[in-house]
């Protein structure tokens, strides 16, 4: 499907000139007189390796209802909401105007993805003034000159990135026909094979009081409420220093291999014992692999005072795994089957969060709010500016944050942003990765002559 790119902005900022340049032909009338474009003008163009549908729109302006200008504005608003990517243009010579601010708010609410273009930046001095566009809350301004072709490569890069994101979203979309891979991991004798048998409804795995009965990681095809599942029972993991035989070492390697290929890991805890360091080490290994994690508190029927035990478990997990805060902890009994339905509900809920993609406009509105609430500390006496944020991957959710001094941004501030992401976009319980990068200057290395 073609990417639909709409060029919007107030009258006479250069929309039709950019439209003609991206379309590769003179497809729209261009004149210094405002209002030459009155209808949506649609043309196909080639950007990078993909075809795009480019939409030139009438100028956005405030007008009385039922007037021609009002009808033109409504057409532009419709194009704005239907586009996959909006190129929001302002005039770099005029700076940010009140009308720009009004329609920037509209773009923040209705557009899926927005790139802010500051047109008529024909010199490095005008390009430097483009930073005024940050106040519109549409991300980092891109200085361009549609008439002279300056900055067109940056626009094409934005379009290509959106094409890649659309392709990735299609690839990442949940496929009901594809089974969800779930690995059951934990210390020896914590009840992994008992849970596997209980979920499958038959005695497929040997169980008993002797630790280490399961040697290999075995997958089992299963269906839960119409969803296909590949359930993998694994050998128990002990501390590396306590592994004293080649079979146990091979079993541990098979468990870690199963974990690398799993989507969700269910960590079995034996609630008849205290939460030990090895349990937490296994949980940390799951998170480091980027897998979604659910904790199954087994043998819950043996707990007399359940409320304080559950609070202690949750608190200890959050303290030990801050990079995956909010990991669901489900009390159950693998022997009786009590709590197994709640476990599977938690597994599929965390799997959905693990594969979630946050729209770039929503992400950058949130980023502005986070910065307003808590400014980043200065880096070596210089102001730290967080310019833009986008999600670059899912499974687990991975974000790129562009800053002017990335090495000077403290880890504590990155954790503050990660916690805000969890609270705002319902990402509790999954690993989050935030990569801080330096924002590129579109005019770096360009001659001033």
Image: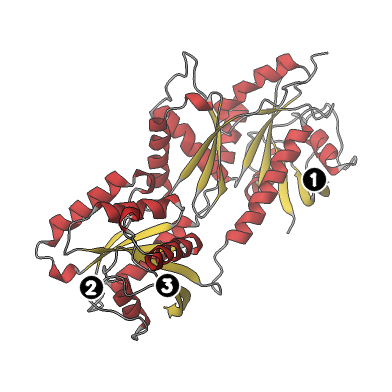
Viewer-proximal residue among 317 and 277:
277
Residue 45, compared with residue 379, is above or below; it is: below
Q: Quadrant of the C terminus?
A: top right
Residue 6, compared with residue 194, is above or below; it is: above
Element at label 2: loop
Q: Quadrant of the N terminus?
A: bottom right
Residue wearing tag 2: 333
Viewer-proximal residue among 210 and 141:
210
- Alpha-carbon distance for marks 3 and 2? 24 Å
* Numbered tag placed on residue 216 in the rendering: 3
Element at label 3: loop
Q: Is tag 1's residue or tag 3's residue first in the polypeptide sequence?
A: 1
**Looking at the picture, how far across and down is residue 53, in whole percent?**
77, 50
- At 39% from the left and 53% from the top, the residue drawn is 285
Count of numbered circles on the image: 3
**Looking at the picture, how far across and down is residue 181, in whole percent?**
47, 68
Disc 3 versus disc 2: nearer the observer: 3
Q: Taking 194 as reference, is 384 left or right?
A: right
Residue 388, compared with residue 433, is above or below; it is: above
Residue 423, compared with residue 295, is above or below; it is: above
Residue wearing tag 1: 47
Quarter-of-image position of residue 156: top right
- Alpha-carbon distance for marks 2 and 1? 57 Å
Quarter-of-image position of residue 377: top left
């Amino acid at each position: 499907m073609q990417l639909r790119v709409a060029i919007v902005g107030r009258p006479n900022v250069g929309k039709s000139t950019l439209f003609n340049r991206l379309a590769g032909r003179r497809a729209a009338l261009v004149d210094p007189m405002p209002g030459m474009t009155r209808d949506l003008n649609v043309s196909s163009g080639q950007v990078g390796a993909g075809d795009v549908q480019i939409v030139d729109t009438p100028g956005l302006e405030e007008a009385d209802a039922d007037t021609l200008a009002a009808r033109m504005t409504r057409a532009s608003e419709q194009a704005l909401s239907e586009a996959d990517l909006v190129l929001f243009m302002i005039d770099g010579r005029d700076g940010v105007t009140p009308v720009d601010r009004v329609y920037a708010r509209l773009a923040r609410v209705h557009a899926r993805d927005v790139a802010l273009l500051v047109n008529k930046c024909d010199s490095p001095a005008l390009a430097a003034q483009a930073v005024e566009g940050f106040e519109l809350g549409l991300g980092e301004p891109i200085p361009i000159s549609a008439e002279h072709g300056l900055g067109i490569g940056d626009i094409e890069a934005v379009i290509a990135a959106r094409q890649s994101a659309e392709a990735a979203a299609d690839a990442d979309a949940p496929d009901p026909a594809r089974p969800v891979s779930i690995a059951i991991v934990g210390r020896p004798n914590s009840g992994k094979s008992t849970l596997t048998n209980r979920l499958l409804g038959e005695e497929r795995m040997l169980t008993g009081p002797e630790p280490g009965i399961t040697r290999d990681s075995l997958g089992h095809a299963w269906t839960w409420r119409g969803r296909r599942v590949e359930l993998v029972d694994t050998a128990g993991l002990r501390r590396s220093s306590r592994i004293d035989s080649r079979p146990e070492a091979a079993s541990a390697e098979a468990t870690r291999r199963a974990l690398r290929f799993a989507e969700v890991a269910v960590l079995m805890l034996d609630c008849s014992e205290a939460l030990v360091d090895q349990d937490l080490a296994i949980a940390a290994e799951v998170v480091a692999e980027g897998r979604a994690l659910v904790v199954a508190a087994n043998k819950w029927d043996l707990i007399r005072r359940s409320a304080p035990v559950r609070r202690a478990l949750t608190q200890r997990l959050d303290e030990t795994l801050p990079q995956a805060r909010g990991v669901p902890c489900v009390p159950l009994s693998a022997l009786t089957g009590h709590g197994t339905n709640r476990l599977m509900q938690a597994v599929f809920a965390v799997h959905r969060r693990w594969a979630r993609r946050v729209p770039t406009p929503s992400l950058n509105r949130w980023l502005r709010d986070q910065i307003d609430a808590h400014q980043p500390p200065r880096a070596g006496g210089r102001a730290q500016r967080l310019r833009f944020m986008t999600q670059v991957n899912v499974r687990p959710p991975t974000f790129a944050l562009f800053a002017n001094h990335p090495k000077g941004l403290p880890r504590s501030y990155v954790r503050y942003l990660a916690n805000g992401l969890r609270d705002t976009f319902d990402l509790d319980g999954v690993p989050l990765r935030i990569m801080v990068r330096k924002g590129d200057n579109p005019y770096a290395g360009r001659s001033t002559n």
